[in-house]
Amino acid sequence: MRNIFLSLISVTLFSLPLAAQTAAYHYNRGIFLSGNGDYKEAITNYNKALEYNPQLQEAYFNRGMARYKLNEYTAAVTDFSIAVKLNPDDEESHYNCAVCKTKINDLEGALQDYNRAILVNPNYAQAYMNRGNCRYKLNDKEGACNDWHRASEFGLHDTNNENYCNDLKNNQQ
């Protein structure tokens, strides 16, 4: 009986590091494949990494990025949403979730994710720019101009937006 108990302990102790190593191997292979543009095979490797470690936030994020590259926006939203749950302070997961929600025309959802990205990083110029675009599509012209102005304060300029906001301001006077 004692030998069986010791065997179970040995199997448990030695299999955990192997699972972690296997998760890391597949995750790193996914990174390599994504870098080479092989997004489908990268997704396969991220899936394997997540089988070994379902808490690997980076694998959800990178699988979401690969799915984005394949125009699988709804699946990417799912991945970014899980990544956000695992790390609520990851501005990039919030931001990319918003980008994908915009692609599937979930503008209210996108707006919420842009808000969260900006809450995590108040200097996130691209999030202000895209939130402005989202607000514009939602017919919040003043909010859009405020966001575009904020983005330009951080060095991200769009003369079309600036001209639009100047015209809007002049028409309101």
Image: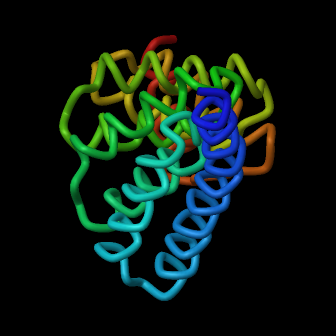
Single out the residue that lies furthest toward the bottom. Answer: 36
Farthest-out residue, top: 173
Q: How is the image coloured?
A: rainbow
Q: Is residue 159 left or right of residue 51?
A: right
Residue 92 appears anywhere in the view: no
Please give the name of the residue rendered at 49% of the width and 30% of the height, measured from the top-left corner.
131
Q: Is residue 128 visible?
A: yes
At a point 48% along the width and 16% down the height, the residue shown is 142
Residue extending farthest to the front is 1
From the viewer's side, name the closer residue of 41 and 106. Answer: 41
Q: How many numbered marks are there?
A: 0
**Residue 36 higher or lower than 15, as above or below:** below
Quadrant location of the N terminus? top right
Residue drawn at 37 percent across, 55 percent down: 47
Residue 128: image location, x then y, percent: 61, 33
**Place of residue 82 in the rendered image (x, y in percent of width and height, measured from the top left):** 44, 29
Q: Say whether residue 21 is left or right of residue 173.
A: right
Image vertical order of residue 4 relative to residue 142, above or below = below
The spot of residue 171 in percent (x, y) is: 43, 20
Q: What residue is drawn where x is 42% and y is 21%?
A: 111
**Is 42 placed above or below 92 here?**
below
Judge from the rendering whether residue 57 lies leftward or rightward of residue 133; answer left or right.
Answer: right
Q: In front here: 53 or 75?
A: 53
Q: Looking at the picture, how far across and down is residue 84, in whole percent?
A: 54, 27
Query: Which of these two is toward me, 67 or 121?
Result: 67
